[in-house]
Every structure is written in structure tokens, then in C-alpha cells.
Image (cartoon, rainbow, N blue to C red):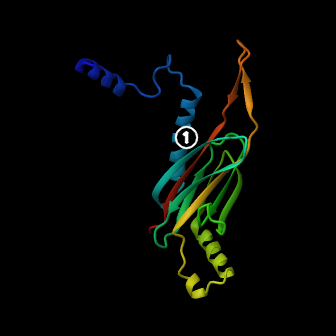
Amino acid sequence: MSYRNIILFFIFFITTTPFEGQKGDEMSPYQEYLLQLKEYRKNCRNALKPYRYDGSLTTHFPYKEYTYVKEIEIATIQNEIYRLSFNAMGIMDDGITIKIYDKPKKYNKRTLLYEKENVTGSEFTIETNEMIDKFKQAKREQGYEEKVVTHLRLKKLFIDYIIPAKDRVFETNDEDGSETKVITKGAVILAVGYNNL
């Protein structure tokens, strides 16, 4: 390949955006969805105020014929109170369940710190102070001494997104009568901030 062709390739690659290549200003439904998610991320981050922004994560998922779990992990620092801002506006189908634990799903004995069912098309924030209280109460019930319980803290949070089962849907092509499976997807955005006043 000559240098001229390489330079032309890079010029084409740099000047083309992922939204170009279609006639006129039309965008595909998927491109419109991605633009919407970008706006949802901004709203999610704004909901953290006055907490200091620490990071965010967008979790994409397809609906399947069985219920399954996607788990994410968040590390916390020292004894700071955290605010978690969820934006589920990217879920347009069946609602998911969000559960927050102190340990990953491979552990049988873990403490459920928070649960919200049927999350779809909404935004909400929660703070870790209530979760810390639940965590300490669970340890008291397990027989830990109070002097130990007072020094306990949550080092990590494990957030489980439970995606419900959904029946297969097929679209029929009018021209040849062939059927194709319709894949339904969703996305939930999480922004995290901590109280550093």
C-alpha cells in the first residue's frame, strides 16, 4: 500500500463520524438511542450534586428467554457517604430489579443492603448511609460485638441488575416471508459521587 493511499485512508477515517454514511440527516433508531443515552448520562451525573463525582457506568443488556443477573462492583473510600444516581430511562421494556449487596454473587452469605423492583423509565438516587446501617444491623444479628460493629464499613458495593425473562418475538419479512428474531435491549446508567465536604 502506498503512502498516498495510507494518508487518504486516515483522512477519510478522521473526517467521518459514526453518524455519517446515511442519506441526508437521517439517523438510525440505534444512533438516536445512543444520543439519548448520552443525555441520560448527563442528567444522571447532575443528580449527584452537591456530592463530588467519582465515576459512572452504563450497563447495556439484551432481554433473553430466561432471567439472568449482570453484576457490577463499586469500591468506596474510607467512611465517606456515597450517593448513587440511577437512570433507567434507557429501559423501555419490562422493568428490571436492582439489588445491592456487600459481597459478590458467588457468596451464599451476603447482606442485601437495598432493593428496588420494576425499574424502568425512571431516575432515582440513593445514599449509602442507610445501607451502612443495614450492614451493621446484620452483623449484630450474626453475633458481632458492638465495639467491632461500630468500626465496620462497606469497602465495596455489588450491584445486581436482574433482567427478567422475555418471550421471543419474531418479525416476518413481507417480501420473502422469512422470520427474524427481534432483539430487545435496555441500558441502565449509574453515576457515583461521595460526600467530601
* Element carrying mark 1: helix
- Spot the residue most to the right: 167
Q: Which residue lies at the image location 54% right of the left edge and 36% below the top edge?
A: 34
Q: Is residue 175 above or below residue 83?
A: above
As displayed, is residue 45 above or below residue 141? Answer: above
| Viewer-closest of 21 and 112 | 112
Farthest-out residue, top: 175
Residue type at the position of mark 1: Leu
Q: Residue at x 73, y 27 (%)?
A: 170
* Residue 73 quadrant: bottom right
| Residue at the spot 49% in from the left edge and 60% down from the top edge | 193
Crowding near the residue tagged with mark 1, few <14, some 14–19, many ≥20 C-alpha atoms within 10 Å = many
Judging by the rendered image, the residue that carries numbered circle 1 is: 37
Residue at screen point 69% across, 29% down: 181
Tag count: 1
Name above or below for residue 105 compared with residue 95: below
Q: Position of residue 148 (x, y in %)?
A: 56, 84
Viewer-closest of 125 and 30: 30
- The x, y position of residue 155, in whole percent, is 51, 69
Looking at the image, residue 121 sits to the left or right of residue 33; the answer is: right
Residue 156 percent location from the top left of the image: 53, 65
Classify the position of the N terminus by image quarter.
top left
Q: Position of residue 158 (x, y in %)?
A: 58, 61
**Where does the C terminus fall, quadrant-wise?**
bottom left
Out of 121 and 65, give the one closest to the viewer. 65
